Image (cartoon, rainbow, N blue to C red):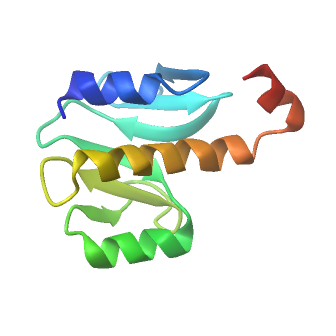
């Protein structure tokens, strides 16, 4: 996937927005103002995604491209390098999982707005 394809997929999530709170290179994706992904257009493409802690450990053991989240809480975040041993279908599953984890922690009122 290219940066634009990945960006479009992440932004296709209901209520997803982005901003640049750290610098002009790192795009932070949010739902209800809560982060669920971070990405820049640096090569190779990498994306930070929230993940269930046990699943995060399992993914890191299986895939070379999945590492503890760069500059993130390593228990809850993974960094995934694209164009490696993680295919597009799995990458989309990981994005969906990250988004769903964040949405599940929203209040009923915040979820109703989505």
Residue 12: x, y in percent? 46, 23
Q: Where is residue 73 in the image (x, y as percent from the top left)?
A: 50, 61
**Residue 4: horizontal and vertical position, in percent?**
24, 21
Q: Which residue is drawn at 25% across and 45% down?
A: 88
Q: Position of residue 19 (x, y in %)?
A: 47, 21
Between 85 and 28, the residue placed more toward the observer is 85
- Up-down relation of residue 43 to residue 52 (above or below): above
Q: Is residue 6 visible?
A: yes
Q: Which residue lies furthest to the right in this view?
A: 109
* Horizontal arrangement in the rendering, residue 46 relative to residue 55 (left or right): left
Q: In which quarter of the image is residue 34?
A: top right
Name the residue at 68% across, 40% down.
103
Give left or right: position of 5 versus 110.
left
* Residue 52 falls left or right of residue 3: right
Q: Examine the image and state in which quarter residue 42 appears.
A: top left
Looking at the image, which residue sits at the far front?
A: 89
Counting the numbered discs, the total is 0
When the figure is inspected, residue 41 is found, relative to residue 44, above or below; the finding is above
């Amino acid at each position: 996937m290219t940066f634009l394809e990945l960006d479009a997929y992440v932004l296709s999530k209901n209520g997803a927005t982005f901003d640049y709170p750290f610098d002009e290179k790192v795009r932070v994706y949010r739902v209800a103002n809560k982060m669920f992904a971070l990405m820049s257009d640096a090569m190779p493409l990498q994306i930070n995604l929230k993940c269930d802690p046990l699943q995060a450990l399992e993914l890191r053991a299986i895939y070379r491209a999945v590492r503890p989240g760069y500059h993130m809480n390593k228990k809850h975040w993974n960094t995934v390098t694209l164009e490696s041993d993680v295919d597009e279908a799995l990458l989309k599953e990981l994005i969906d999982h990250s988004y769903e984890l964040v949405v599940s922690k929203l209040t009923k009122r915040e979820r109703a707005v989505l």
